[in-house]
Image (cartoon, coloured by chain):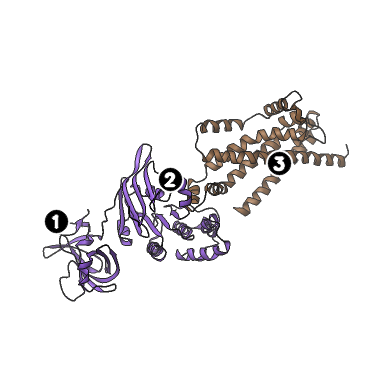
Amino acid sequence: MNAADLYELRGVKRTVGGRAILDIECLSIAEGALTSVVGPNGAGKSTLLKLMAFLEAPDEGEIFFRGEAVCAKDFYNLRRSVTMVDQSPFLFRGTVFKNVAYGLMVRGMDREEWGYRIREALSLVDLAGFEDRSVRGLSGGETQRVAIARALVFKPDVILLDEPTAGVDTARVEMVEALIKDVNERSEASVIFSTHNIAQAHRLTDNVIHMSAGKTTQQSIENVFSGCVESEDGARFVRLRGGVRVAIPEERTGTVRFSIPSSCIDIEPASDGGDAINRLDGTVTRMEIRGDKVRIRIDGAISLRVELEYAQLKGKNITLGSRVAARIPPGDMRMLE
Amino acid sequence: MGAAELGIETFNIMGVSLKVSLAATALATIVSVPLGFIVAVRDFRGKRSLVAVMNTLMALPTVVVGLLVYMLLSRSGPFGFLGILYTPTAIVVGEFILAVPIITALTYAAASGVDERVRKTAESLGAGASQSAWMVLKEGRLGIIAAVIAGFGRVVAEVGSAIMVGGNIRGYTRTMTTAIALETAKGNFILGITLGMILLVVALSINLTVNAFLGRKV
């Protein structure tokens, strides 16, 4: 276990009616990171989140939180710093104010601080002025956002969000996604969210845990794209947003989904000309040193995550904000379906 | 008996009725609400059997309770030394026994019907066991208040136990229902019906008061 691990799960099993709904051999989640858990319905995402929220105990195995093995008697204290927002959140009878205040009340927080904190939390979720509204008249999306505000208001160390954009109208999905990133970046909170939307998972974070039939595969499938295969002068390619074209090596037709491993992509300072296919021009918006490697995020017409050796990057004169051209070697993409 | 005297006696009877019924309901509420709540939220062996017993006891005949309490409190009974037979206290004891199963069973039903997410949500927001239990009670309060009102309705309207252990002593243990029974036996149907109407008005007033209170709170 690394010192920076927030959670470590070893041999964790959860069984219902004799059927294992969760079976995790080993899983680590880093402290302070934004992590997504992605998988289809019934993959065990919600069960995993409930275990990490200390709302349920595993039937087998051990959960370590910040390096300490956790048992049921620790749950109450741990829940003071870890909170979870359910997929279909329940709002207590009464007003939005009373709901958002609940976490402050059970912590015995000074009432003078309530008003400011509640207003701040509600404005974060775009519900400023909703304090006196009864929860009865709220829409599904508003309910979801009140529940997120209720979790944010007491500034927990860990926020677990189960399908946070489920039920949120399309126009506000981006707002919730931005909020998730913002909470993670501005506060020191670790944010773990589940989604069945693989594109959303990768759009928001590099730390993606894939789940299927109760099991996890922590491999990170990055740079996932999909599109319709086009053909021109015998070449097959998929045209992505902004006209970015990616050559498809296989004999595929129709819609394809593929990932481009971050370690396969090469970057150079932007220059005019060159092959327009398999190339993305963009700006370096994030650089993160991990050991002897550097992870880079490039935002252009599409976003790409790139991983380079630190030594390899040094000679390229690329820094945060540099305009770069990312080149995708033909044939290095992995077809997903 | 003059009209004024009759009026005073009717008020006296109403006072005794309300006093014993409210006391029995209050005591039964103190015991039954936590009991029904615990049975609802805890899983234990024999829970289903206990619920079946509670439901059955809701139909406990008032005369059976009267007989039981009479045997316990009579001079030769185990609690005869207390000397409370034929007192309002004895009526409270009998009515308490009648109210407990009703309030317990209906509280159980109300708490069982509260959304499971209430407790989970409270816990995930940092609530302790008692704080989350309180939240479940608050969310189920309409059903629980209905349980208490049903218990009060049961005891204010019962006659069998009150007459057996209270003795229907004029100005002391005579309640609305025992007075109705007495007046009917004497052939004073008009007075019996009048007392019956007053009893209904009293019960209705209590219900309206509770509903008005809930209307403001919900």
When the figure is inspected, residue A98 is found, relative to residue B193, above or below; the finding is below
Identify the residue position indicated by label 1 in the image. Answer: A251
Q: Earlier in the sequence, mark 1 or mark 2?
A: 2
When the figure is inspected, residue A135 is found, relative to residue A56, above or below; the finding is below
Task: Indicate the secondary structure of the residue bearing disc 1.
Answer: loop
Task: Indicate the secondary structure of the residue bearing disc 3.
Answer: helix
**A183 or A188: nearer the viewer:** A188
Which amino acid is tagged 3?
Leu
Residue A121, image x, y percentages: 48, 63
**A305 or A39: nearer the viewer:** A305
In the image, is A54 to the left or to the right of B48? left
**Comparing marks 1 and 2, which lies closer to the viewer?**
2
Q: Which chain is purple?
A: A
Question: Neighbour class for label 1 at 10 Å: few (<14), some, many (≥20)?
Answer: few
When the figure is inspected, residue B155 is found, relative to residue A271, above or below; the finding is above
Which residue: 41% across, 66% down? A186
Residue A130, image x, y percentages: 52, 63
**Comparing marks 3 and 2, which lies closer to the viewer?**
2
Residue B50, image x, y percentages: 55, 32
In the image, is A99 to the left or to the right of A7? right
Q: Is residue B66 visible?
A: yes
Question: Neighbour class for label 3 at 10 Å: few (<14), some, many (≥20)?
Answer: some
Which amino acid is tagged 2?
Cys
Identify the residue position indicated by label 2 in the image. Answer: A71
Identify the residue position indicated by label 3 in the image. Answer: B22
